[in-house]
């Protein structure tokens, strides 16, 4: 499974790429069910910091991924984009190294560092050759504990972010995604864009960046995974060196759980573009819910399977209304959502949206067939191993498994959890997941589509 917080982007497939993806899909469906998971070792440093380690002595690379609880949901209401701006600027100089010197040192030692903010987490990753791991860990320590946030560097990155936001303000896919989330969570941090707005990003100061770092980066919410040529004792010492000086606990706000609101509402955002972008969704099922795996299979059959899904078959293959259509279940600390997206010709928007409604309701009422369920199980079991074919993927997946609190043996248990889902389970959960009105945003100048306000 992939991590939550996916972008609401239409998948456009055609020509040679389509043929390649068909071949891949056929290969994955034919893969054996068993997934030989990596051997995971739980390492606890002398200072009590825990990490999951997969030793790869034959790979002269260290891949370290980590996450702190608290992402964009820790942004002040009037300063959306703060967490993401921290992620963009935290490696623009640290300690006694300004931005130029810091990046020169990374380049000299072939060290890759990256940071990102999601709705619930602040994540980072490190990639370095084994011979440079000491220098790499020191560079990471500096970024996390003594970032400079120099005025010139902050302004340079801010201007880059603002340029991106101005582009998004004219992009129908970005507009549709932002509008959907704002309508679904109007009074919750989830309703604000992770990368902020032009106005909110302009309000963020260097002191705001430092305040976020001090409030959010703490050992008690930290999840770490490492893959590569390193032993447990060496890793334990490095964990203390990098993370040991961080505060024990964060200073975070308490957030309430929330469900998407406005189900049944249809919003049209006027934009002079030839296509209409459609984003739709409703309540999801949380990752810890006993029905989650059944919901995951149902979603795969409906729209998550891309080339094999019902929506792809009905909307793309049979009628040629779009290049691609995709649905997903996304889970967060305080909500879960079912969402989907596509793009179609403006004069076919009404037909496309009606067909989406029809297929969602058909799945809700009748559930999948036995053959569809068997094929989905085979694909999801066979393709899972692709998430562990590099050290970088291993580290990223192990952090996500920790964030989801699935247990260190989850990889070995996953196939049995999939196999345990019966046709009756899938039909029951399909109704639970999909028998709701959809919240819809359409961007463009769609024909045959009218706004709907369920409250009016």
Image (cartoon, helix red, strand yellow):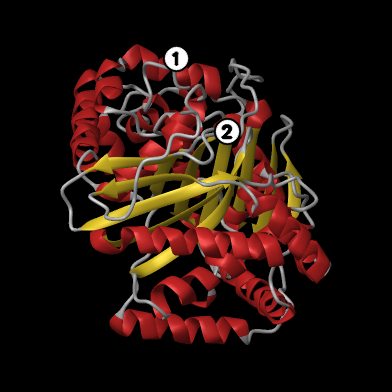
Which of 448 and 232 lies nearest the eye of the viewer? 448
* Residue 386 on image: x %, y %: 57, 71
Q: In this view, does 46 lie to the left or right of 95?
A: right
Please tell me whether mark 2 sits on a helix, a strand or a loop: strand
Give the label on residue 219, or none.
none
Horizontal side of 431 relative to 383 (left or right) equals right
Q: Is residue 229 visible?
A: no
Q: Where is residue 413 in the image (x, y as percent from the top left)?
A: 80, 63
Residue appearing at x 78%, y 65% in the figure: 412
Q: Disc number at residue 211?
A: 1
Q: Camera-side residue: 444 or 340?
A: 444
First along the sequence among labels 2 and 1: 2
* As drawn, 64 above or below 199: below
Q: Quadrant of the N terminus?
A: bottom right
Q: How many marks?
A: 2
Q: Nearer the viewer, residue 11 or 1?
A: 11
Q: What element does badge 1 sit on?
A: helix
Q: Position of residue 446 (x, y in %)?
A: 27, 53
Query: Can the viewer see residue 278?
Result: yes
Q: Find disc 2 in the rendering and name its residue.
A: 68
Picture quadrant of residue 420: bottom right
147 in relation to 340, above or below: above
From the top left corner, tell me how far across and down residue 80 is, in percent: 38, 24
**Which residue is depicted at the point 54% across and 25% down?**
217
In the picture, residue 41 is in which quadrant? bottom right
Q: In this view, does 213 lie above or below 285?
A: above
**Separation (CA) of disc 2 from disc 1:** 15 Å
Q: Residue at x 69, y 62 (%)?
A: 365
- Residue at point 38%, 28% (across, down): 86
């Amino acid at each position: 499974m992939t991590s939550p917080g996916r972008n609401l982007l239409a998948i456009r497939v055609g020509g040679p790429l389509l043929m390649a993806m068909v071949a891949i899909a056929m290969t994955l469906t034919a893969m054996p069910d068993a997934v030989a998971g990596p051997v995971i070792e739980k390492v606890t440093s002398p200072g009590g910091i825990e990490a999951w380690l997969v030793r790869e002595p034959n790979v002269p690379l260290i891949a370290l991924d980590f996450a702190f609880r608290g992402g964009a949901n820790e942004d002040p209401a009037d300063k959306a984009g703060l967490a993401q701006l921290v992620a963009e600027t935290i490696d623009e100089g640290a300690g006694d190294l300004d931005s130029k010197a810091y990046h020169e040192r990374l380049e000299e030692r072939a060290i890759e560092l990256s940071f990102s903010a999601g709705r619930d987490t602040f994540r980072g990753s490190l990639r370095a050759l084994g011979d440079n791991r000491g220098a790499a860990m020191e560079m990471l320590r500096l970024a996390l504990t003594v970032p400079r946030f120099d005025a010139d560097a902050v302004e340079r990155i801010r201007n880059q972010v603002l340029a991106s936001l101005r582009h998004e303000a004219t992009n129908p896919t970005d507009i549709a995604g932002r509008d959907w989330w704002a309508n679904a969570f109007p009074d919750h941090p989830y309703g604000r864009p992770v990368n902020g707005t032009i106005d909110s990003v302009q309000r963020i100061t260097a002191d705001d960046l430092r305040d976020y770092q001090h409030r959010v980066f703490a050992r008690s919410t930290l999840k770490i995974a490492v893959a590569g040529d390193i032993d447990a004792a060496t890793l334990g010492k490095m964990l203390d060196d990098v993370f040991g000086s961080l505060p024990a606990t964060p200073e975070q706000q308490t957030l309430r759980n929330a469900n998407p609101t406005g189900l049944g509402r249809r919003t049209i955002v006027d934009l002079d573009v030839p296509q209409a972008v459609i984003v739709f969704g409703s309540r999801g099922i949380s990752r810890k819910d006993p029905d989650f795996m059944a919901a995951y299979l149902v979603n795969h059959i409906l729209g998550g399977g891309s080339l094999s899904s019902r929506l792809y078959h009905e909307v793309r293959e049979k009628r040629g209304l779009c290049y691609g259509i995709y649905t997903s279940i996304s889970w967060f600390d305080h909500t879960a959502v079912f969402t989907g997206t596509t793009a179609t010709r403006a004069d076919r928007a009404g037909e496309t949206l009606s067909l989406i409604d029809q297929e969602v309701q058909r799945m809700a009422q009748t559930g999948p067939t036995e053959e569809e369920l068997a094929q989905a199980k085979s694909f999801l079991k066979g393709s899972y191993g692709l998430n562990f074919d590099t050290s970088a993927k291993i580290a990223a997946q192990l952090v996500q498994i920790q964030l989801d609190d699935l247990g260190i043996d989850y990889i070995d248990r996953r196939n049995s959890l999939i196999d345990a889902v019966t046709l009756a389970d899938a039909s029951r959960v399909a109704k639970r997941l999909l028998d709701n009105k959809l919240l819809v945003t359409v961007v463009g100048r769609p024909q045959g589509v009218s706004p709907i306000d369920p409250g009016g």
